[in-house]
Image: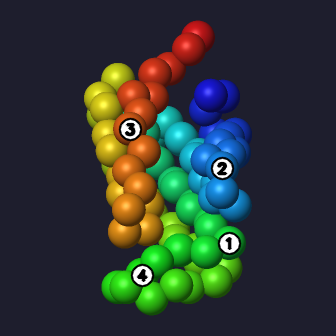
Amino acid sequence: MQLGTPKRIILGDGKDCTITATPLTNGLLQMNVAYTAKEEVVKGQTTHNFSQRSQFLLPIGRGCSPKLGEHLTVVMRPAMIE
């Protein structure tokens, strides 16, 4: 993934997420994750055109596993490529 450039990942079944990692001067990455789904079950009810956004800080090289919706977790370990 090119830092600062959004990366779209198609998850199938009308679901995808876009991840943007931006390096900060303090050695952390600012992670922005946008998740969309044509249908998503939320609290037992089907929701159409579901979207969720999250933003968090992550030390470079450390893994994370943000939860998307109620039933999907994406595991990743961003790394800086020079």
The amino acid pointed to by label 2 is Gly
Residue 75's tag is: 3
Q: Which residue is mark 2?
A: 12
| Mark in the foreground, 4 or 3 | 4
Q: Which residue is mark 4?
A: 42
The amino acid pointed to by label 1 is Lys
| Mark in the foreground, 3 or 1 | 1
Question: Of the residues under marks 2 and 4, which one precedes in the sequence?
Answer: 2
The amino acid pointed to by label 3 is Val
Q: Quadrant of the C terminus?
A: top right
| Measured Cα–Cα span from mark 3 to mark 1 | 22 Å
Residue 15: percent from left, percent from top: 63, 58
| Measured Cα–Cα span from mark 2 to mark 4 | 18 Å
The amino acid pointed to by label 4 is Val
Question: Of the residues under marks 3 and 1, which one precedes in the sequence?
Answer: 1
Q: Residue furthest top?
A: 82
